[in-house]
């Protein structure tokens, strides 16, 4: 899979997953506990996996930016 295409897919999934987590977090008082656990906890684990994929897909860019001397943190 092309890195750009994979990055687009992972970013869209991250956005959807974050929306689900925020919505379920804001409505946790209205959702029964059994439903909340599956609707909120599973996307939480999925978020960790997607972030790892995102970091992996962007690892070349992160390494490249760390080696350049004109980064904000190096000034």
Image (cartoon, rainbow, N blue to C red):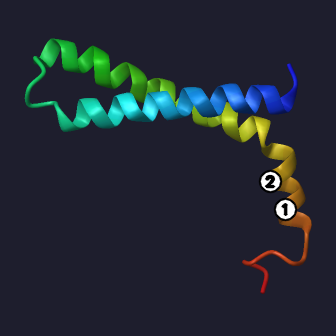
| Figure quadrant of residue 11 | top right
- Give percent across and percent down for residue 65: 84, 62
The N terminus, quarter of image: top right
Q: How many C-alpha atoms fall within 10 Å of the one at disc 2: few (<14), some, or many (≥20)?
A: few
**Can residue 49 be spotted in the picture?**
no
At x 74%, y 78%, the residue is: 72
Q: Is residue 61 above or below residue 56?
A: below
Label 1 environment density (alpha carbons within 10 Å; few <14, some 14–19, many ≥20): few
SS at circle 2: helix
Asked where in the image residue 2 lies, by quadrant, the reply is top right
User: Is 43 on the left or on the right of 58, as rendered?
Assistant: left
Q: Badge 2 is on which residue?
A: 62
Q: Left or right: 9 with respect to 26?
A: right
Residue in the foreground of this view, choosing between 31 and 62: 31
Foreground residue among 68 and 15: 15
Residue at 45 percent of width and 26 percent of height: 45
Real-space CA distance between mark 1 and mark 2, rounded to the nearest whole angstrom: 5 Å
Residue 59 is left or right of residue 21, and the answer is right
Residue 22: x %, y % from top left = 32, 37
**Residue 54: mark:** none
Q: Secondary structure at mark 1?
A: helix
Q: Find the residue positioned furthest to the bottom.
A: 75
What residue is at 56 percent from the left and 26 percent from the top? 13
CB-based contact (under 8 Å), mark 1 and mark 2: yes
- Name the image quarter holding the C terminus: bottom right
In percent of width and height, residue 20 lies at: 36, 28
Regarding residue 23, the answer to whether it shows in the image is: yes
Please tell me whether residue 65 is drawn above or below residue 31 in the rendered image.
Answer: below
Query: How many marks can you see?
Result: 2
Residue at the disc numbered 1: 65
Q: Nearer the viewer, residue 72 or 4?
A: 4
């Amino acid at each position: 899979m092309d890195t750009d295409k994979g990055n687009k897919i992972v970013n869209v999934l991250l956005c959807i997953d974050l929306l689900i987590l925020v919505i379920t977090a804001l409505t946790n008082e209205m959702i029964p506990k059994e439903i909340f656990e599956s609707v909120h906890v599973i996307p939480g684990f999925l978020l960790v996996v997607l972030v790892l994929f995102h970091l992996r897909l962007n690892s070349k860019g992160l390494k490249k930016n760390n080696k350049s001397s004109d980064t904000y943190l190096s000034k």
